Structures are given as C-alpha cells and as structure tokens.
Amino acid sequence: MLTFVARRALAAVPVLLVASFLSFWFVRVTVDPTAKVRQSRDPQAVARLRERLRLDEPVVVQYGVWVRDALRGDLGTSERTGEPVSRMLRRALWTTTQLLLWGTAAAALVAVAVGVYSALRAGGVADHLLTTLAFLGLAMPPFWFGLLAIQILAVDLTRWLGLSEPLFGFVGLHSGDGSGFTLDYLRHLVLPVMTLTVGIVAEWSRFQRASMVEVLAAPYIRTARAKGVPRSRLVVRHALRNALLPLVTVMALDVGLLFGGVIVTEQIFSIPGMGRLFVESLRVGDAPVLVAWTVVTAAFVIAANLVADLAYGFLDPRVRPR
Amino acid sequence: MRRWTTMVTGALVCALALGACSSSGEGGNGAGGPSGPGPTRKAAGTLVLGAEQEPDCADWIGSCAGSAWGLWTIQVHTIPRVFDYRKQAGVWTEVPSPLLAGAPEVSERDGKQVVTYRLNPAARWSDGTPITSADFRFTWRAVVDGEDIYDKTGYDLIESVDDSDPRTVVVTFRERYASWRGLFAAYGVLPRHLLEGKDRAEEMADGYEWSGGPWIARWRKGESVTLTPNPRWWGPPPKLAKVVFKFLASSAAEFKAFESRTVKAIYPQPQLEVVGKVTRRDPQARRFVTTETGNVEALWVNNDRFPFDDVRVRQAFAYAVDREAIVRRLFGRLGVTEPVHSFNPPIQSRYAAPAFERYRADPRRVEELMRAAGFRRDGDGPWRKDGRVAEVVLTTTTGNKRRELTLQILQEQLRRAGFRARIGNLPPADLFGEHLPNGDFQVALYAQVVTTLDPGLCVVFCAKNIPGPDNDHSGQNFTRTRVPEADPFLERVDVEADEQERIAASKRADELLAEAMVSLPLDPLPNIGLWDRRIEGPVADNPVLGMFWNVHEWRCRGGRC
Amino acid sequence: MSTGHGADRRPGPSAPPGRRALRRFVRRRPAVVALVVLVLLAAACAAAPWLAPYPPNRQDLLLGPVPPNRSHWLGTDELGRDQLSRILHAGRISLSIGLAVGALSTAVGTAVGAVAGYAGRRVDQALMRVTDLFLVLPGIAILAIALERLGRSPAVIVLVLAGLFWMYVARVVRAEVLSLREREFVEAARAVGASGTRIVVRHLLPNVVGVVVVNAALAVAAAIIAESTLSFLGFGVQPPATSWGVMLADAEGYVATPQAYLLYGPGVAILLTVLSVNFVGDGLREVFDPRTAPR
Amino acid sequence: MNGPAAAASPVLRVEGLSVVLPGPHGPVRVLDGVDLRLDAGRTLGLVGESGSGKTTTALAVMGLLPPSARRTGAVTLGGVALHTADERTMTGVRGRRIAMVFQGSLGALNPVMRVGDQIAEAITVHRRIGAAELRDRVHELLSDVGIPDPWRRADQYPHELSGGMRQRVSIAMAVANDPEVLIADEATTALDVTVQAQVLDVLRRIQERRATAILLVTHDLGVVAGLADRVAVMYAGRIVEEGPVDALFARPGHPYTAALLAALVRLDRPVPPGTRPVAIPGSPPRLDEVPPGCAFHPRCPLALLPEPCGRAVPEAQVATPARRVACHRGAEVLSGRLDPLPVEQRAPVAATVVSTARGVGPASGPPLLEVEGLVTVFPVRGGWRRRVVGRVEAVAGVDLALAPGEALGVVGESGCGKTTLARSVLRLVEPTSGSVRIHGVDVLRAERATLRRLRRRAQIVFQDPEASLDPRMTVAAIVAEPLRIHRLWDADAPQRVRDLIGMVGLDAGHLDRYPHELSGGQQQRVAIARALATGPELLVLDEPVTALDPSVRAGVLNLLADLRAELGLGYLLIAHDLAVVARTCDRVAVMYLGRVVETGPVAEVFSTPQHPYTQALCSAVPVPDPAVERTRRRILLEGDVPSPLDPPSGCRFRTRCRRADERCATEVPVPTDRGGGHLVACHHPGPEAGWGS
C-alpha cells in the first residue's frame, strides 16, 4: 500500500511540472512583472528586476531559475507587499484549506443524506421538491446566493431578532481579532461554507441520488433482500457503500472547481485565503504571487485527486492495490 | 516640489488599490489639545471598525508610503509626527503635534533656511526610550540613503540635522524650501535605536510592535489590525481598551457589516450604491459627508494625442462634457452638486482659482471650436478632419463601478457632441505603471489625492516633468502638458515662502492651465463616514489623517460598543 | 424458409432515431416547459432591437433610478436607463457567450475525445494527459488573468471559457467512444474493410451525439454562470456592452436598498435560463441514456 | 386448482398469480393466472424463454417485485399466506424459510463485502448467534457447497472468485438457514458446461441432504431433465404445460414444448445425417404485445384460425391426472392423433447473388483456410502506468485447415481462446506469430490493399446481433455498407441488397427498419446478410446463436446450413454449445487454454472422445432425456480453469486431468492421428470406460 501511495505521488510529479511550467509561462506572457517597479522613480530598479528574473532570457530559462529557487523554498518576493511569496501562500492556503475541508465535509454530508433520501423516495413529493431545489442551486450564480444569504441570514435576521451581534458572521473567520476553534469560528463558517458549496451540494446530491437509484436496482441488493436483510440494513450496509464509490471520484474532480468558488466566497466574506490573495495580486499584477499561486493551486488539485484515488482504492476492494 | 509627488504616489497607490482615494478632513470639534495627561480613566471596551482595504505593507517611507489605509489604520496611531491638522477659522492648518513642545521656528542662517523643532520632554517610544533629535537625524538619513524610498523630495535638500541636543532638532537646508512643513509629518519620525543598522524595510514591512503614538498596533495579515493602548504614551490615554480594524474585501460586505453592526464605523469610498445607503434613514447611525477633501477627480487628457493635441479640440471637449449633470447624478443625493474648478483640491482652496468654471456644457461652443480646428461633421455623425475621426478612448481603472458609470455618461455626452467615444478600461497596474507614463492613453479618469496642505502642481503640469530621457522617464506629467506661460508660476509655488505671493502664483497658474484646458477637473470625491451613535467622542473627517486619526479620544456609551 | 419473417411487431412506419428521441423528449413535461421558456427567452433577446421599448444605452440623468412603473416595466438604473431594454440586449451577449462556449467547447471536446477514444493507446494517453493538465490548472484564475491581461471582449471570454470547459466533454466522449469501440458493430465495420475515418465518422460520432448534446447543454449553463461570476469579480464585458452578469454585478450593492429592483431582472434572467438549460439537458440525458431506452 | 390428488403435501403453492407492471404505454400484464405446486423435498422445473415471466414468478413468490407491481392471486408457503403478509413478515420469511439463488453474474454478490460476511449476514439477520459459532457455520456451509479452503475463501471479495465459485457462495448463502424452499433462478445460465455440471451437482447434493424443495427456473430443458421431478413450461406469462418430467419429455402435449424439445440435440446419439433442427417461426412476443387468444398461435403450426386459437385463451386442461396442457388442441396432441412438429417448408435461396455456386460438403483441392502455429498474445496491463505486467497467450499455437465448403466447429469453454482465434484469423486482432492463409494468400502479412480484398472473401458474424449492428443505421444501410466500402455500389446494388435480405428470410419491408425494431433473430439475419454482401467464401461465425432464444436458434442454424449448401461457403464456427456444432459442422476442434486438444469429424469426436477434456466436456452437457440423465455417470472436472496468465507446463489440462502423470507436466503433447483425421493431443488418449450409451 505504501509503495502504491509513493508511486502515485511520483506519477503526479511530471503533471505538476508541466502544469507549473504552463502557469509560469502564462503568467509571464500576460503579466508584466516590472509593472509596479516602473512606477518607482528609480530607473535602475526595472533593470535590476529584469536581471534578477532573467527576463531577457527565454521563458524556459526563467522557469528553470524559478524551479530551482522554488525547490529551495524560495518562491520569490511579492511585488505588492515585499513579503516572501511562500509565507503569503502558506498563510492563505491554511485559511482556504479550512474552508475547503469544512465545505467538502458539509457538502458531502448534506448531499449524501439528500441523495439517499431522494433515491429511497424516488418519484415522490419529497424527491421532486429536493430535485427542484437542486436545480435551483445549480442555476444560482454563487455570488448572488452569498450576498442574499448575508442580507437575509445575517443582516435582516439580526435586526428582526433584535440582536446586538449578527447570528452568523460574514467578515473573516472570527469576529474582532479572535482566533482559534470556537463557537464564534463556527458561526463565521456557516455562510461562507453555504456559498461555497451551494452548487456542489446540488450536483453531488443529484449524483448521489442517481448512483443510489442504480445501486438499489443492482442484483446484489435483490440477493440481500432475498436472504431477508431488513430495509435499514440494506440501505446502509449494502446500498450506501456501493453508491458512495462513484461520488468519491466526482468529489475529487470538483475540488478543482471549488477553487473557483473560493475566489468568489473569500471575496464576499473577506476571508484572507487563496482566493483573496489571488484577486488582490491580480489587481496589481503581482506576477511572483500569481505564478506561485497557480502552481500551488494545481498541486493542491493534484493532491486532492491523489487522495481520491487512494480513498477509492480503500473503499473498493476491486481496485485495491495488493 | 515634493508634496505633490508624495501626493501623486499616494494617488497612484490608492487608485491601484482599487479605490477612490480619500484622505480625510475636519479635525473639528476642538479635538485633543497638544498634550498633558488628562484625568486617567480606565480604558474599557473593544471597538470594531471597518477598513475597506488592507495595506500592502507597513514600510511607510518605502514601498508602502502613501497607502491611505495604512496611514489610517496603523501609521497615524504609532508613528510620531511633527504636525497635526486642524480646521482653524474655517481653514485647514498645521498645528504642532504632542511630539513638539511648541511651534517650530524657521530662521535663516548664513543665507540658509533653518528649521528648529523643540521636542516635548515627555515624548518617548513604547519601550521607554525618549524620542530625540537623533531619531530625526536617523529618519533623514534613512530617507536620503534608502534604496526603495518612494519620494525623497525635500529631504534631499536638507544639508544637516543637528542632534547635539537631544531635545532640540536643528534642520539646515541647502536651499530655500517652501514646503518644509511636510517633512517629518507625512513620514513622521522613526526610532533610531530600534532600526539603526537593520534593514528598515524588512523590520517594518509586516508591521512592528513599537510605537511613538497613543496605540500599539498588531497586524494580523488579511484579517485585522488591533490597537491596544501604548502605556508610555505621554498624551491623554486612549479611552478604549482595544480597537480592531477588520479588513473588508467588498463594499457590499462593508455596508452589511455596518448595518449588522459587525463593525461600528466605516469610512467608505463614495460608490453609487453607497450614496443610497448613506442617505437612508438609520436612527442608530451617525454620518458625515464632506467635500472638503484633498481629492480631485479629473478627466486627464493626453495633450499629445490626436485630436487633443489641438487646444481648441480640448476646449471643445470641455464644453461637450456636462460636468454638473455628472456630479449631480453621482453625488447629488449627498448634497454635492458643483464640480470642482481647479486642480488644487478643496483643502487647498485658498490656493485655487475657480478657473474651470467657464467650461459648462455648450453645444454651440463645441461646434465653433471644432470648426475652427478644422473639423467637419455630417448631421449626427462624428467630427472628422482630413479623414480622421475625432475618436476618444476613455480609460479608467477596472473594478471601480462608479468610474465605469461615469465613463458611460461621458460616452453618451461625447457621442451627442460629435465625438466617437470608446471605453477601454485597464487594470490599475497597467494604467499607472505603463499607459500613463508612456503616454499611451487619450482620456483617463482617476483622482489625485493630496495628504498635505501645501500646494504644488508643477510636478504634474510642468513641461520639464513630462516623462522622458531628461528625467529618466520618471516625470509625472502624464498629460504631456506644455503651457510654457504657466510653468514659471507653477515652479514658484514650490519655492515661494511668502504666502500671499504663493497664493497669487498658484491662482495665476490655475487660470493659464484652464485656458489651455490641459485636463478637466470633475469632482472633489466627497469623504463619507458612518458610525454607530453609541460611539462618543470627536468623530469627524480629517482630510489629511483620515477619520480614525483620533480614535484614542473615542469611547462607547456606557462602556459597551 | 421455415422461419422466414418474424412477426412484424410494429406495423407503423419506422422512425429514425432522431425523431424517436424527439418523441421521447416530448413526453417529459418539465423539459418541454423549460425548452419553451428558453426559446421564448432567446427569441425575445434576439429581437431586442425591435422589442425593447428604449435603446439600451439611452440615459436620462435627470430621471435617475426609478422603481418599476408603467413606462419602465422593470425600472431604470442610476443613469436612467431602461432596465427591460438593457436586460433584453444584455441577454444577446449572455446567451451568445453561453451558446458560443457550448458550441466551441463541445466541438473541441468531441474532436479530442473521439480521437483519443478511437486512436488507441499512445494518442489516447497523450491527449488524456493534456486533458488532465487542463483539469488541474485553476480554471477561473487562468480565466481572470487572461481577461485582465488580454482585454475583456466577449471573444476572449468565449475562447477562454471554452478552453476551460472542453475537457469535460472530451472525457465523456472518450469514455463513450471507448465503450462503443468495443461494441461489435465497430468490429463488424472493420471486418468489412471500413477505414478508420469511416468508422469514426459514420459509426462512432453518430452514436455519441446523445452525450455530446447533453454535455453541450450543460456547458451552456455553466458558461452563463461562469460569465456572471467573472463579472462579479470585475472581469465582465466592457461598457457600453453589458451582459446579465455585468448587470447583476453592477447591482450587487443594492441589496436591501430602494434600488433593490435592479437585482431582480438580470438575476431572474440568469436563473431562468440556467434552470431551463439544465432541465432541457436533463431531459435530453434521459432520452439518450441507453439504460432508460426501451427496446 | 385442478392439480392431481398427490399424496405429498405441497410446501409451496401458487394459485392464480397475476402481476401487472406499469409500462410506457400503460399497464402490462406480465403474469397471467399462474398456478404452481411444489412438494416438500421435490424439484419443480420452471422452463421458459426470456420474457416468458418465469423470473417474475419467482420474484412474486419471494415478494421481491418492484413496488410499482400489482400482484393478485395466492402464494402459500407451508400454510402461511405470503400474499397477504406485510414486509416485516416477509423479511422474516425470506432467507429463512424460502431462499433464492440468482443468475451467477458478478453483480449478484455485494462487491464490497467479503463473501464470508455475506454468508454470515444471511444467518445473523434471522437469529442471534455467537461469533465463534457463526464462523464455524460459515465455513461449514462453504465446505458443503464444495469450496475448498473455506477459511481463506471466506475472507475474499466476490471479484476474487471464479464464476462457479461465486455461484456456490450464493447457494451457501441461500441454504444457510435450511429453508424449506430454494428457488434457483437461472442459477447455472452464465456458467460453462463443466462448471454448470458441478453446480447442478451441488444442488442435487443439497437436496439429498436437507430435503429442500427446489424451484428450478431455467430456459434450458436439458438442465431440467436431470434434476426436476415435475416441469412447468411458461410462455408469455402463462403456464402452457405442466407434468412429470418423464412423461413430458416423452410426449409433450403443447406444440411449443414439442418444438423446444425437438430443437435439442443429444450428444449421446449421433446426429442422423441430413436432419435439421425443427424451427419455430418468429420469436417470443413482448409482454406488452401479447397476441389475443392463445399467445403462441402466430407461431403454432397447429393453430386453428381464427377460431378458437386466435380468439380464446386456452384453459389448462387436465389431460392425465398429473398433467395439464393449456392448448386448444392439447388433447389431440397428447392422444397422438396430431403431430405437434411443424412441417418443413423451405423457400429457395436466391443464389444469384453469389456468382459461383459450389458443391456441398468438404471438397478436395487447395484448402480455403490454413492456420499454422497461430499464436496471439495479449499484454496484460497493470500498475500505475498501465505497463505490461504479463502476457496472456490466448491462442497458443493452433493449426487448422478448412476445405472450401467445409464447416469446422471450434468448441471450448469461456477463456479457451476460441473467440480470439476467430478474430485472429481475420486479423481483427493482430496475431503474434504463425500464419493464416486464405486461398493461399497470407492474411497476416497482407498489405492494406490486399487485406481489403481479402475482407471481401472472408466475413464474420458476431455473437450479439444487437451490438453488431450500428443502432443509427437502417437495415438497408447496414447491408449496403460493405458494397459501398468496396466500391461495388452501382445501379444494381439496391436490387442486390433486396436479394440479400430475401436470402436471409426477411422481406423488403425490413429495409427501412432500425436494428432496435427487429427481434434478435431478425437482427442476426441482417448481420448474416451483411456478411454475405460481398460474396465471401469463408464465414467466421462467432457464437452466432448464443444470444438468441432457444426457439429462435433453430431457424438461424437452418438458415446457415441452407446458405452453406446453396453458396458453397466455408464456415469456421465458434461455439461453446456442442449441440450447435454437432448440428452444423463437418469437423470439430476442441480448445483448452489456447490449444486445440482434439480435432476430427463431428460424429466421431462427440461419440467417442479420446481426450479426457473432451470427454468431460461432452459428459457435462445435460442429456434431454430424464431417464438417461438421472442414471448416467458423469465425469465431473475438479476446480476451475487455471489462469491463462500462468498456464500449467506441459499439457495444459493436466491440473484437472485424472490421467495426468509426470510426463504430462514436462512434455507438451503433440497431436497424433487416431485414424480418419481424428487428431488427439494427449499423452494418454483413449475412451473413458463407461462413457456413451
């Protein structure tokens, strides 16, 4: 098993290399890394920067230098803040990882529950209602959902209930300058996680429903019924586990898409994660951050896919490595 | 000459950071006398305030100089400066800060200008080390010798800083320098004993724990700045136990945060929907809206580019634009109905002549001027000359909805006047980093923001400051303005010590610039503040130091915020 | 011959698969309703120049924002522009972007998927690596950088969005082709001597039409959402052109203000369109799904 | 119920069972008044073709119909009325008193549960039991069904077991609580004959030991013959005939039963030359389009039309005390006054299509097809980069020769490489070495153009007719495609397409149809027409009737025989069903693990097999004669086919051969002629004592 993990991880390296090169190249051709320096009144500054980034050499060489530095843990220095990019990314990634973990967990839980319930009541009123909701969730621009959620669940609710503080926070992950895993933190997570996951909850629940319906029609379910397995055990022990398998793959693929959602969510909820780092860096054309950002994000997605592969192997004995 | 650059830099950084650039006003209400510990009351309560942007870094004399929100959230509270800004007799003026024991003295010695500051003996850093003339000297050297210093203007004219007496700072200039009041004010004074021999930029960039002001600031990147009282502060102690600036990423969230009282005060950009929200009735909220700002939002015209390389076309352009309609539409509900008529911002109004008042929408004048310039027009079609269409590309920074809307109004007005107008917005970095310096634009909409009371337009309108080989392409005259008659007056404003002469020169320059219609000032970009009524204290705008500069004097009704 | 003709079970004339699919689609009520809504919406937008009560960019600065009333059914915005007219015109751009992205990504995806699925190991692996690569790259970020840097014209939006969507179609088509390739009719064609091109064009592609159409519909919906999200982040089309996403993003701050009506029009337009497209796609999926197809 | 006054008390009784399912065009009556009676400890065979309702009957008895089904009638199990029982009660009954074994597909067992746990679950859901006792019980059950090494097997997952093994697990699960009734629904259908024989043996032993009553649901009358006491035949949702197995086989009372029986081939007797299987026209009706009156009447040679067969549904008539026949003319048939077998009618084949008609039967002269030392190796990929981790010699050195007009059958069980052989011969898969010559032209080394020309002369018909026709093409387009590809499309071509369609027994009305609108038999005829379009001399037939219903098979086989006679075609026929080869071919080659072990004239090989494997194979085929089947000695093979990834050394069959000795492990047996072209590749050839009749 361990060698399998190692091999899969190793296999991801070339993908990461090519992805990082593409990201690097793309940012280089689109974002001028000297833009900010050019506003400085020091004419030598641009020349110094050009030399440091080897802008006069081919992109491949620049990339090579970048990789060499990156392997030493040096992802460059932000043009905007002068801070080491690696430090900025570490900070942002930690915040975003929290969002993604909570988001994925909550979304999976809700989606599976809804999907299973719908599948068991397939064709019923509840199923139709949940299907309609899912379609609405899919059709809703996520930022739109987030803004409405803030207005209704935070602002209006606060006023109606006459609270001095909103029930759900929507600025950052803590109120004031708090920190740590507290009730306050959870209250701040609710709205961003909802916004981040509204689309995927809808999608996953639809997927889970379909997969569950299919599994419920599988011959082994009939076999289990024929031996007298009661319904509850049938659903949990036989149907659910099999129906979860395909969802795992879909979830992994969607983590990449979630990164898009993170950009919007963090923007709306003022959360200092990868999304906001990206938006801020893009606005000022902070090339070093943008390069590192795309590469790290790609690595994150690759890692997520890897985890999903391994999870799939763990869940499904048919593909379990020996 | 130097303030303008600071200002311009400020404007750039500010605009870069997406914003309309405000910087603050109305020290009003007779806030805090210079010094002397008042009756000590126990500091109580935590106040959470909204900050619209996060500063990029806290290196106030280096790469992050002029960052408006950096100034408002950290710098004013921690860096000692020689002047505060108060409105006296209806005019914004510098007053000595608690750092000084009295007003600085300006004298002449051996034909050189000498400024003497006498320091308040109680002034000390948060570690107890007294603030001395050595710190002034260190600050001067740090600016002059520093590598990434954004603006050395003024400091580079200092010949020496005498620190022989720790309590007396004697600054000797190489030549006369009218704008000396900006020195050690915008940049403040840095602690020599903490920074000497170290990489200052590195030490300060991510925030610092020392202070020479009422608060000690702790900056949590991305989330907040927390101010706690500086126990060694020699002035009246802060009345609050803690002040937190939460960074808000979007203006929509900003208002909701205030509405739900997640934050208790905000200082928002005057976006359109903001206007609606500010004017809504909320009995729990207090507000100010002021046009007395250091801002001038203008249509900056490239004087080198067809068709605006012809003064008559520029004038026609000015007559084609209905500035009043635009200002009324944008800010009418805030009570702002009149465009600004000078490039000197409202807080420098005594240096300003309402020279652009002449340009009011007038289709007839447009017609006359265009024909005089050799343009012809068929019916509703655009003006043409030698087969070339009078086409205008209007540019502003992407992401600013109000400015984008403004351009849409302009587009419509220009179309009617016979100009073919296109909108080509650019990311701030591109606009300020590339297109403006290279002259690769036609008409750009952005604001200049001034954080000093000293006037000075030469840096943006003198011909010698057109970016080019002579000034290492570092000039700030992006509009390529060449009005030879105006240049002497503009230069004089920078050096003239006599106030009356200076005012006269400035007004004359205004007239000449308006005559040549080098660019078209639009509006003063009002400053807006909203706060919960439970906040007590002198809450008001300060056009130089921002709304929160005296937050140490704020408290909450009943100690609860 | 003794066993001659089997009993003809359906005496009526036989229908080609397309007509059959149509017939089955028509039986799905929500999908049909959605299709009607979609067609009406698209037609209204297409006819905007004739249908809209005002020119979309005509300003009335004195009027400013007024709530819906008899002369402005959906009210006016800050510049006094008629919302209904703008929504109709914006729809042209939103729908065009959606359709173009759907068409482009489907075309590319189908071509890549079909080639990868049929050509066999080496080509397949190469193409799939490329596909994986695109899936790994942070899509919306690339998109934003591209728009910020290459200009925000609808063409760039379409190109880049399509560049981010084709992989999904490619994967589905490839999987479908791979399974079709193993079907014996393909082998039969080879046994008869058919060339690779003929097999792809005559046998494989007609049989993947189902999944392709379904995925194209989903791509259209996703593109409209993506466009609105980009607009929210400030990367929408340039004025005076506007799209639903840009209108919605412009109205973002008006939640819970007297101008909140500005939010409803474009929001409902997006919601309705995407909802309809999804319903139609879902209907198509069931029509084309071999598992639900009765023999 | 008009049943016989039997002495034994019925343990399961089904009376007037009807089931209606919702369909796209309204409700469909899938079962119509089914009466069944199963006595304790006895076996009832329920026989019918796909869609006849036999599985629905089984599910209805178990209460496992989908919720949308409406069921009427009574089901009584040992005095308990199941038709009125609620779901809770049924859950308690299922698996404890009445259990079911399903068709042994991989999906019948939960893929993510260990088989031991699945068996254990069958016990624990019905009673409390200690962990140790449970484990012992599971292992005991696994041994009971003949699974060696039960301790290890219990910890494996279904995909790690072979098909036969899985089916044994299913049986173990079903009998875990010693139920009174065991329903085996097509329990051996997907299995190879040798494995089928093993599994049937397990069922037989279980019944002997536990006196379980078995309802044996199958489409294969042969299977029923050996195991059942009574037989019920279903057609279109009704029981058409029921009776004791001997009497029913000896003298079928319903024309349908008679035709099914007549279509069976007995391997224990040589096929009389020139005989043809009796073909029932048409195909079984879809349940939503059941003809009025007797559902069988459109296909029935005895039907009296319009009255009564076209109008009235025949009631079950009690012919003798133990027999019932639901046929208007059943009495006449049973009394022998009427022959239920249809009279042969044959339309002449339009021979104009193929210019050169050749003689029937093997002809002398140069061989049509020569295969020498053919080896086809597949790489097996695995691991993270899908690298080649092993090689499967699917075809491991095969020599064959086929004379013009000759029909050679290739038989063997799944995985023996026969299908790969078929595809290799036409180079649909790329062989690794050896040579294939068609009329002396080397196929394997042919250039593209030569290969194209060859493909006009050699064609293939696949197993699954539906899969082998492009669903988006009309019949006309499908048949015309070869002509277009080979640039033979001219003014006469449309007529040629019509001729071809006529030749395979369809009419021009079918030309505009799409494949899905045709029955399986019709689809296969279209596939044959396509294969004939370019006038080939060699047809490779890969399991041409396997996917077809038994009543339809004979028609297709007859067609193939006729075409061969008319057109002088050479056939290379691949089949797992020995009967098909016995009927159609002149010679047969028996394959095992990629090698031909025995080859020779059909009659000789099947009547006196020399190779132990051939003997086991022939022995495993059930004989459709209850008397013989009950008494004959079977040669049961041990274990499963070894993995082709790692075939045994020497003789590949040695691991399962009772004659094997050291020589077999080291030396690959060379085919030796036992006379008359009967070649055997075995170190110890010879007839098995006691084999044959």
Image (cartoon, grey):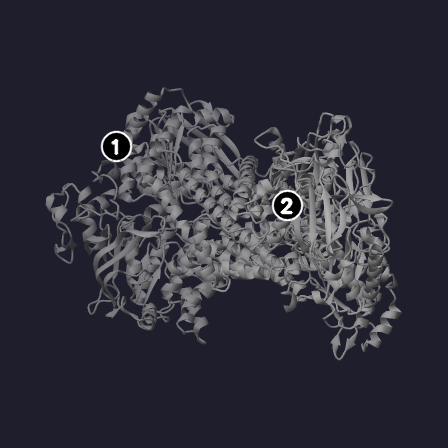
- Mark 2 vs mark 1, foreground winner is 2
State how many labels appear. Answer: 2
Question: What amino acid type should be assigned to the residue bearing mark 1?
Answer: Asp
Give whichever of C279, B398 is nearer the camera: B398
Q: Residue D172 location in percent, x, y?
A: 33, 30
Query: For this view, does B285 lie left or right of residue D554?
Result: right
Q: Nearer the viewer, residue A4 or B197?
A: B197
Name the image quarter holding residue D332: top left
Residue A18: x and y in percent read 45, 56
Q: Residue C60 in the image: x percent, y percent?
A: 84, 57
From the top left corner, tell me how far across and down residue B292 is, in percent.
82, 49
Label 1 neighbourhood size at 10 Å, few (<14), some (14-19), many (20+)?
few
**Residue denoted by label 1:** D149
Q: Quadrant of the N terminus of chain D?
A: top left
Q: Secondary structure at mark 1?
A: loop
Question: Is D389 positioned to the left or the right of B374 in the image?
Answer: left
What residue lies at 30% left-to-right and 39% top-to-bottom?
D164
* Mark 2, residue position: A267
Contact between labelled residues 1 and 2, with CB atoms less than 8 Å apart: no
